[in-house]
Image (cartoon, rainbow, N blue to C red):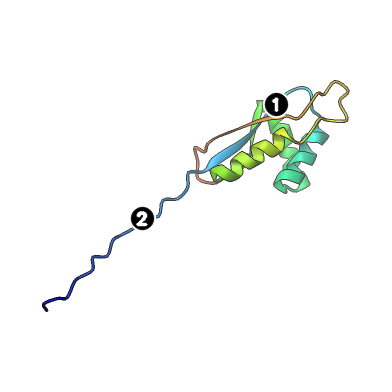
Amino acid sequence: MPGTQTKQATERKTKRPVPWNVVLLDDDAHSYDYVIKMMQELFAHPLERAFQLAQKVDSEGRVVCKTTHKELAELKREQIHSFGRDALIAGCKGAMSAIIEPAEFDGQDDADL
């Protein structure tokens, strides 16, 4: 038909965001109670899970707290850095350290606990 234009359907592929790990780094200046409280307050982990994460960061030097999109991972890292000092440790000068890194697996928080 003259004057009829055909519309080409453009196929759009939605890319899934790259998952990022929020990784808590160990130090000797924070107690298990501090780590457990932080995991419960910042990540809503139940007590048993928070304790497992505290054990893992203590034994392995690092633990994945959460796997999420980059913006939330950045926020969670900053919340860890802002959590404050451990009142139970006299020499504690501040919060724990954390980093974010691209996840090597698809959306699972430290599944091997």
Distance between the alpha carbons at the discs numbered 2 and 1 = 40 Å
> With 105 as the anchor, is 57 left or right in this view?
right
Relative to 22, does residue 93 appear above or below in the rendering?
Answer: above
Q: Position of residue 105 (x, y in %)?
A: 50, 41
Image quadrant holding the N terminus, namely bottom left
Which secondary structure, mark 2? loop
Kind of element beneath mark 1: loop
Mark 2 or mark 1: whose residue is earlier in sequence:
2
Rendered residue at 65%/37% (across/down): 77
**Mark 1: amino acid:** Asp
Q: Total number of numbered labels?
A: 2
Q: Nearer the viewer, residue 37 or 95?
A: 95
Q: Is residue 32 visible?
A: yes
Res 15 label: none
Picture layout, residue 75 above or below residue 31: below
How dense is the environment of label 2, judged by Cα within 10 Å: few (below 14), some, or many (20 and up)? few
Q: Residue at x 72, y 28 (%)?
A: 58
Crowding near the residue tagged with mark 1, few <14, some 14–19, many ≥20 C-alpha atoms within 10 Å: many
Q: Residue furthest left?
A: 2
Image quadrant where residue 40 sits: top right
Q: Which quadrant holds residue 22?
A: top right
Residue 30 appears at what percent x and percent y?
Answer: 79, 27
Residue 23 position in % (x across, y down): 62, 34
Tell me: 1 left or right of 76: left
The residue labelled by disc 1 is: 26
Tell me where residue 47 appears, x and y as whole percent: 78, 45
Question: Could you tell me the amino acid type at mark 2?
Answer: Lys
Q: Nearer the viewer, mark 2 or mark 1?
A: 2
Describe residue 15's horizontal placement relative to residue 98 as left or right: left
Can see residue 110? no
Q: Could you tell me which residue is drawn at 49 percent across and 37 percent down?
A: 104
Residue 13 disc label = 2
